[in-house]
Image (cartoon, grey):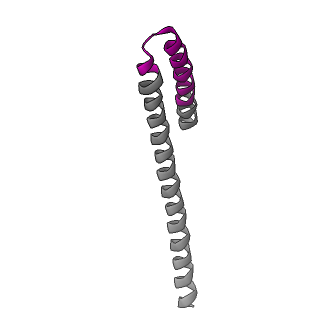
Amino acid sequence: MRHIIMAFSAGIALATSVLSGDEDLRAGGPWVLTLIVFPACSLLCLAFILRDQRRRERADGQREHDSASSTAEKGGSVSSER
């Protein structure tokens, strides 16, 4: 849940900075900051969130695979003893 909220916040920050950058570009304000720096930071934040989520999914899948294979090994050793 925490990662969903973080991704939503980063997306909102990206959209807000692009809209503010457009206004700053028309008004002559600090458009470089709002059109380049802030969106880049938001995109980096989203990329790191996605990377962490993929790592977590791989680790969960590996744990499930390991537990299934260890269960199969235990079941195989019991049946071979009989």
What stretch of residues is rendered in magenta?
10-34
Residue under the image location 58 percent in, 86 percent down? 79
Q: Position of residue 11 (x, y in %)?
A: 56, 30
Position of the N terminus by quadrant? top right
Front-most of residues 75 and 64: 64
Position of the C terminus by quadrant? bottom right
Q: Is residue 12 magenta?
A: yes
* 55 is higher (above) or lower (below) than 22: below
* 72 is higher (above) or lower (below) than 4: below
Q: Position of residue 77 (x, y in %)?
A: 52, 84
The majority secondary structure of the magenta stretch comes to: helix
* 39 is higher (above) or lower (below) than 31: below
Q: Position of residue 62 (x, y in %)?
A: 50, 62
Residue under the image location 45 percent in, 41 percent down? 48
Q: Position of residue 53 (x, y in %)?
A: 51, 47
Q: Is residue 13 magenta?
A: yes
Front-most of residues 47 and 23: 23
Residue under the image location 50 percent in, 51 percent down? 54
Residue under the image location 52 percent in, 32 percent down? 6
Front-most of residues 54 and 13: 13
* 22 is higher (above) or lower (below) than 72: above
Number of numbered discs on residues: 0
